[in-house]
Each structure stands twice: as C-alpha cells, then as structure tokens.
Amino acid sequence: MSTETTQAQHGSKYDRLIAAARAAPPTPTVVVHPCDETSLRGAVDSASAGIIRPILVGPERKIREIATKFDLDVSGFEIVDAAHSDDAAAKGVELIHAARGELLMKGSLHTDELMRAVTAKAGGLRTDRRISHVFVMDVPAYAETIFVTDAAINIFPDLDAKRDIIQNAIDLYNQAGFGHTPRVAILSAVETVTSKIPSTIEAAALCKMADRGQITGGLLDGPLAFDNAIDPEAARIKGITSEVAGRAQILVVPDLEAGNMLAKNLAYFAKADGAGIVLGARVPVVLTSRADSPRARMASCAVAALYARARRQKAPTVAA
C-alpha cells in the first residue's frame, strides 16, 4: 500500500463521521467538569463544528478562567455550577435524567469518578445491558475503521458480560453509520479451541450464542489470533475460511488488560487515532483523554452524536 493511499485513508475515516454528524442539528451534550484546556477545547471545537450543543457542568469560576486563559469562547454555553468533580458528575447525571442532554461527555475528572455516578444503583444511568467501552480506531494501514472492545471498563468479563460487550459494539456499528452486519473477531492467543486457554472456549460459546440468536446483527468468528483476524494471508496460511477471518471490523479482546495493550499498541506503533465511547447506559458517554488528538476528540463526539440520533429515531413514539 502506498504512503499516499495510507494517508488518504487515515484522513477520510474520521472525516466522514464528522461530516455525517454535522449534517444534523447539534446534539445536546452534558460536559462534566471541563476544567483544563484539553477538555474545554474539545467541547468548544465540537460545538463550533456543529456536532454538539454543550451544557458545561463544573466550578463556573474555574471554567471561565480556563476559557479566558486559552481564548476559548464559552459565552453561548449554559454553565451549571458545581463545587467539585464528584458534584459535577452527580449533577451531570441529574441533567440526563431531566432530559437536558442526549450525551454525557467526560471533562478533566478521572474516569472512575464519572463512571461511579453513571453506574450508581440509585440515580445512575444503568440499563439492563452491561456497560462497556469501545475504541473506534482509525489505523492508517488498515482499510476500515476498527472497533476494539472492551479496553477500559470490564476488567475480567464473564461470558454473559462478553455477550453484552459484543452486542453493544454491534449496535454502535449498525446504528452510527459504519455500515451493517459487522464482522466480529473474538480474539485469543490461538485460533483453536483448547481447555488450556479459557478465552478460546468462551469465544466458541459466543459464536454458538450468535447462531442461536442470543447475539444479533453481526457475523461472529472465534477464537481467532490477532494476525488471522485482520490479515487475509495469515488466515489463508492457517487454513481458516470464514467471512470474518482476515477482514474483521470489531475486535473483541479476552480482558481489559489485553484490550488496553492492543489499543495502545495501535496508537503508538501504528499511529492510530482512537475515539472512545461508553455504551450500555441510558445515553452514550464520550470518554476522552489528554493524549487524544483534537481530531480524535471530535470524532468521539461525532460517533456518540450519530448513535444518539439513531437511537432517538428508533425510539417508539408515545400517543397523546
């Protein structure tokens, strides 16, 4: 693949998502504790692009000081004053319950502070689906956008949790404009089922669950090693023939440790951008970090906005 082709692909994947998100009215978004330049700029840039309409939740004085210091215009945004990060997380969740926002966006607080409020048994944003995280990755050397899940929330997911993790990722893929019926590779160290590696047994069970309609909307195969999940020649050499092998679009990792290492390897070795989104709650949650590029932060908002819009259009109407 030529350098020119690689660069063109790298520039186009997120750009298409951002353009699609800008084609509709901005999505009301509750931004929790945007109290540093990176998080506040991410909200301001996404608002300027027409992707979101932010409500900023946090210490008002500090937010305005950051805006002034870094020349960020927040004059058109509603600011809900909160004493500190925990208070901001709680108030952000309350605003979602009050139907003030369709997205929740992480600011400069720690992820666990925000997720405590989201997952709280009383007053949180839980549904009957397990909450999970997806990295939507633009890898320059790979022709398609790749999902990596779960690399941030579930540490050692069991079989039932993995079912929800996969379903969350499939639903995002199908509803946020990536296409339909994604190819899902359930990763392990090897591509054969062996009792010595429990993740291979779980992969086989998940594929059978899909056969029986317990997972819908995607094509599953596994266990697959990373190479024969994403490289057709590696799959051919191993004698693996399936619609998924060598052409995966969603990579399901055995546990968080493996997923986090895979995502960071793609980011630092393959120079991939990674947009982060949490699924399975009442609304999508945009997770960004200081290491994210401005384009990746905007792509995170775009993916979440597209998904929120699709869910809104799919929701049943209530008769008057």
Image: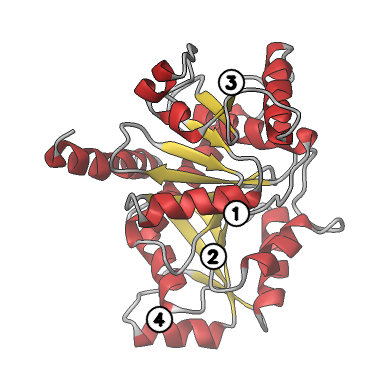
Label 3 secondary element: strand
Q: Which mark is residue 220?
A: 3
Look at the picture and state if 291 lies above or below 164. below
Query: What's the distance in space between the residues labelled 3 and 4, CA to CA?
Result: 46 Å
Q: Which residue is mark 2?
A: 55
Helix, strand, or loop for circle 4? helix
Q: Position of residue 76 (x, y in %)?
A: 42, 69
Drawn side of residue 23 relative to residue 12, left or right: right
Residue 240 lies, in percent from the top left, at 49, 15
Q: Gap between marks 3 and 2, in whole Å? A: 39 Å
Q: Disc 1 designates what residue?
A: 101
Q: Which x, y percent locates residue 87?
A: 71, 76
Q: Is residue 36 visible?
A: yes
Q: Count neighbours of disc 2 (C-alpha within 10 A) and say few if under 14, some if 14 to 19, many if 20 or more.
A: many
Q: Position of residue 277 (x, y in %)?
A: 55, 49
- What number is the disc on residue 67? 4
| Residue 292 vertical position relative to residue 314 in the rendered view, above or below | below
CB-based contact (under 8 Å), mark 3 and mark 4: no
Q: Could you tell me if the residues under marks 2 and 1 are in contact, i.e. CB atoms within 8 Å? A: yes
Q: Earlier in the sequence, mark 2 or mark 1?
A: 2
Image quadrant holding the N terminus, namely top left
Give 185 or 179, whichever is nearer the viewer. 185
Residue drawn at x 81%, y 59% as measured from the top left:
120
- Residue at the spot 24% in from the left edge and 38% down from the top edge: 9
Which badge, 3 or 4, comes first in the chain's sequence?
A: 4
| Circle 4: residue type | Ala
